[in-house]
Image (cartoon, rainbow, N blue to C red):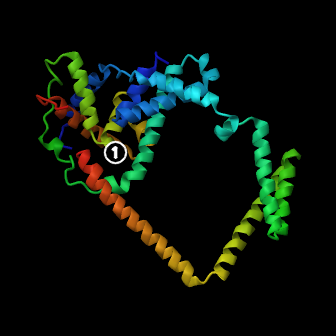
Amino acid sequence: MSLSAEEQARLEQLIAAACRAQPPLAAPPTLAARVLAQLEERAQLPAWRRSFSHWPRGQRAAFVLGSAALIAAMLGAIGRPDAQWLTTWIGSVWLSPLARLESTGALLSFLAAFTRDLGVTLLQDIPRFWLYGAGAAVLALYALLAGISAMAYRSVYGMRSGA
Amino acid sequence: MRAYQDMVYSTAARLLGNDAQAEDIAQEVFLKAYENFEQLRTSATIGGWLKTVATNMSLNHLTRYRRRWRLFAELPDSGSSGALETLFCVPDTLCDGIAADEQARRLELALRRLPVHQRVPLVLYHFEELSYQDIAQRLHVSLAKVKTDIQRARVSLAQLLTRPVLPA
């Protein structure tokens, strides 16, 4: 830094004074209308079209339990007897906090075991060559896409913004 | 809303350096305020709340944008402003003899000319009145980098403002 401490302090004072004197920018006249239109649009949306956190509690609970029950049924259908942990967890909503914690732990260990078994099954049943080939193809396509995108961005957007 | 819309929009526009994005962020800020209407209605600090939310949303937007385009946009640039200060002499005044509204227009324009890594800490320091330490924490960069970037931003800003003509 070639400026002396005194020059830096003087520059800081100049810029600070200019910024302090700066009036706020005028918001576009369309802003208020946009906000009101958006609010009106949101108010007309049915509950299930809004974000999950805005659903009524009853609907949220029903959705989570219904989804878990569906997953449990599907896992049961493909012969995973340990899927019972899922149904136990669903039922634990009405149990004590300790029972709920134990049940959640059991559910997590079930999910870990399921993921591990799925990985083992995939690795055993699919030839290694296919797996490595698919991985290499995905990486090559990703690199190609990144290269094309970088070139397009640098040549089109970069030139337009004068970067 | 009308009482605060200029403040919210200014905060976003100065951080982002882009009118359209600033309007989008301002809209999101007021929608969020509406979601918290019950809590804010009786609050005496609604202005501060809106400003903080506008700042946070703008910084989040910049972070997302930067992550998305970093690979493409931040390749080494030979036109870096590293040597600017070596030729710079601090003026006695900025925009001397220029009408206040023209001075304000020039400052906004000059802010937009700054690269984002200089503009954001400068705006946070001089407009949002955050400390160097707070800025470093918010931007997840070192304290030394914040100080250097702000110093370079001041030099660039002063150079732009003391030019006889600042093209639009």
- Work out whether residue B126 or residue B64 is closer to the camera in this orientation and state it: B64
Q: In this view, does A117 lie above or below B133?
A: below
Residues packed near mark 1 inside 10 Å, few (<14), some (14 to 19) or many (20 plus)? few
Element type at marker 1? helix
> Residue at the location (21% across, 48% down)?
B82
Up the image or down, A100 lies above or below B119; here it is below
Q: How many labels does the image show?
A: 1
Q: In which quarter of the image is residue A49?
A: top right
- Residue A125 lies, in percent from the top left, at 67, 81
Give how far across and how far down residue A148 sits, in percent.
34, 62
In the rendered image, the quadrant that contains the C terminus of chain B is: top left
Tell me if A112 is positioned left or right of A95 in this view. Answer: left
- Where's residue A2, x and y in %? 17, 42
Question: Which residue lies at the image location 47% right of the left edge and 74% below the top edge?
Answer: A137
Visible residue check, residue B128: no
Residue A55 is left or right of residue B98, and the answer is right
> Mark 1 highlights which residue?
B144
Compare residues A36 and B86 and report the one nearer the observer.
A36
Q: What is the chain identity of the residue bearing mark 1?
A: B
Q: Is A48 above or below relative to B109?
A: below
Residue B152 % position (x, y): 25, 40
Is residue A4 or residue A59 the one in the foreground? A59
Quadrant in which residue B5 is drawn: top left
- In this orientation, does residue A37 appear? yes
Kindly identify the amino acid type of the residue bearing the numbered disc 1: Ala
